[in-house]
Amino acid sequence: MTDTVHPPAKADQTRRNEMIDWDDAFENMAYIPGGAALPGQWAEAAGAYRAEMAKAGRLQEDVAYGEGPREKMDIFAPEGESRGLMVFVHGGYWRAFDKSSWSNLARGCVESGWTVAMPSYPLAPDARISEITQCITRAVTVAAGQVPGPIRLSGHSAGGHLVARMMCQGVLPDDVAARLARVTSISGLHQLGPLTAIKLNDTLRLTPEEAEAESPAGYDPLPGVPLTAWVGAQERPEFIRQTRLIEEVWGLKGADVTAVYDPGHNHFTVIGALEHTDSPLTKEILR
């Protein structure tokens, strides 16, 4: 005779949630030695790559995809004929950074023969997350109109959330969705409910209703589009949980989901692999 396992009562689950320090769960920089110096290093490396590509005549800078001052993207072209489009969406908890901090992360895909578009987008608190999702929909659509062939999307952290939203049914226009070949969410956030409980929400202004509506895990994914959920194995437990969550939830819906727990990497070192054509992450995005 086997024991029957019952789920915890709702009151018990609420008490457990109240015991979790959600601010700490979503904190990355404080757990990474030298973290405070990283944004300056990122901007320097990105600027050098942008200058290199501009000199080679392979950079279109500040291509507008909307009317807002931050609705612009940079497009990096490979040598010779392009194999298709890869769009990379940056992170920063929907409140920080722009395309100019991450340009060097285009290198691996560009040198593999792909055109890479990197959009900026409006930031919280000026924009709600639902509005940012709409901006990225426009960015992908405009970029798709400039580059023929298959489309691959990747994004980091908040950018991982945004590219996963693009894979939800009904978000991208049908003709663009039909060209979508793979989505890679790197350290992505796929269930936003816990964010309503942290200090960051003073900036994000997420309501429980919007958190639910903007959580990719609550949607049906586009049929036939593979998702890779990639996370550093040394990241905060919440980011590992968010990766496992989308793997399980979308996997149960029949999606082709691969989860990778990258050994030795934290929330920020994990994306450095995008600079290299032969890195497992670059190869995964383009496979």
Image (tube, rainbow, N blue to C red):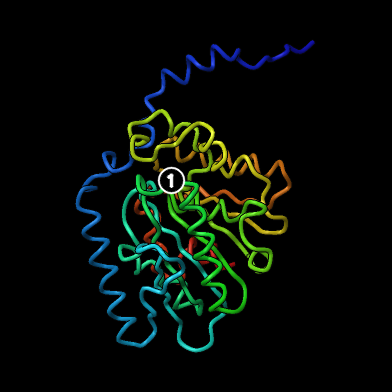
Total number of numbered discs in the rendering: 1
Can you give x and y, in whole percent of width and height, for residue 150 in the image?
62, 72
Of residue 165 and residue 130, the one placed in the foreground of this image is 130
Q: Is residue 266 visible?
A: no
> Which residue is painted at 53% across and 87% down in the image?
81
List the single residue furthest toward the right: 1
Whether 44 is drawn above or below 132: the answer is below
Can you give x and y, in whole percent of width and height, for residue 89 in the image?
44, 59
Whether 53 is drawn above or below 161: the answer is below
Count neighbours of disc 1 (C-alpha within 10 A) and say few if under 14, some if 14 to 19, many if 20 or more. some
Can you give x and y, in whole percent of width and height, for residue 90 in the image?
40, 57
Horizontal side of residue 34 vs 282, given as left or right: left
Please name the residue that numbered disc 1 is placed on: 128
Kind of residue at badge 1? Arg
Image quarter where the C terminus lies is bottom right
Q: Secondary structure at mark 1?
A: loop
List the single residue furthest toward the front: 67
Of residue 231 and residue 129, the one placed in the foreground of this image is 129
Q: Is residue 39 visible?
A: yes
Image quarter where the N terminus lies is top right
Horizontal side of residue 257 vs 158, given as left or right: right
> Which residue is painted at 36% across and 76% down in the image?
61
Whether 221 is drawn above or below 197: the answer is below
Can you give x and y, in whole percent of width and height, for residue 40 in the image?
21, 59
> Which residue is painted at 61% across and 51% down in the image?
258
